[in-house]
Amino acid sequence: MDVFGLVGNPVGHSLSPPMHEAAYDELAIDARYVTFEPAPDELEAAIRGADALGVCGLNVTIPFKQEALDLVAADELATRIGAVNTIDFSGDEPTGHNTDAVGALRALRDHDVALEDASAVVVGAGGAGRAIAFGLADADASVTIANRTASKAHTLAEEVPGAAGQGLEDLEGVLADADVLVNATNVGMEEDATPVPAEALHGELAVLDAVYRPLETRLLRDAASVGATTVDGAWMLLYQGVEALELWTDREAPVEAMNEALRSRL
């Protein structure tokens, strides 16, 4: 039996186990997906232990994504993003990858959103915003990063090819001509709030909210009310998992089965 899993602290809330195990059942793979919760200073020991025990792959979540970068052989994208969320143990040494960026792109494309030459605005300059900004730039979109602390947006924009940075106060102006909007903050998770004024939205936008609890955030409700294309955060969660599964198994993921298992628990 193959073993895959998730390392983080805490991990009790994770929806990854049912999503991945639905895929194993669909593909008739003899495998299990388990969670590991090492102490905050024990990530290196956890990775070494997983490798020694024959674990095939690990997802990595908060607070370990940045630290994991220095403990594995990270690929080029994960190195640029500065974080690893997927580890593969199939080679001579553990390799690190970041599927968050691809997860966001696949979620948008699944909703027929064209990214090449698109004007994209990413709200948030934290870990998720960083991954998504690099992914959009790699997809040949023009990226503007907006953040409550404008200096953080400018700092990230200096690293992302062709990107611009700004504060949130200028959102309405930059969104007027935008094609894609991504909320990469946690605003809307704990309360019925949005980082984007409703009057800044328009029907030509595609709006992805990385928040998946609740599925229908205030931002998405506001976007739907003006006729924008809306993409909830579960799609990004799904496709980062799909990408990890395909990396580990070299098989096409059963997206429908994984999506059903994920949404049945939201």
Image: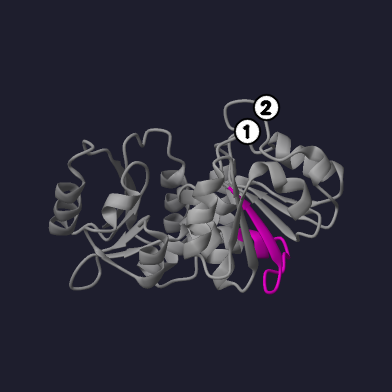
Q: Residues within 10 Å of mark 1 (few under 14, many from 20)?
A: many
Residue 17: give x, y in percent of width and height.
Answer: 41, 45
The correct choice, above or below, for 198 with respect to 165 in the image is above
Q: Residue furthest top?
A: 191
Left or right: 257 as drawn, with respect to 99: right
Let me know if residue 222 is in the magenta part: no
Which residue is at the front of the view, 260 or 26? 260
Which amino acid, by three-letter code, is at mark 2?
Asp
**Element under label 2?**
loop
**Element under label 1?**
loop
Q: Is residue 168 visible?
A: yes
Let me know if residue 112 is in the magenta part: yes
Image quarter hosting the N terminus: bottom left
Which residue is at the front of the view, 203 or 37? 203
Residues at discs 2 and 1 in contact (Cβ within 8 Å) = yes
Left or right: 202 as drawn, with respect to 33: right
Residue 163: give x, y in percent of width and height.
Answer: 58, 64
Rendered residue at 49%/48% (across/down): 152
Residue 123: give x, y in percent of width and height.
Answer: 61, 48
Rendered residue at 67%/30% (across/down): 193
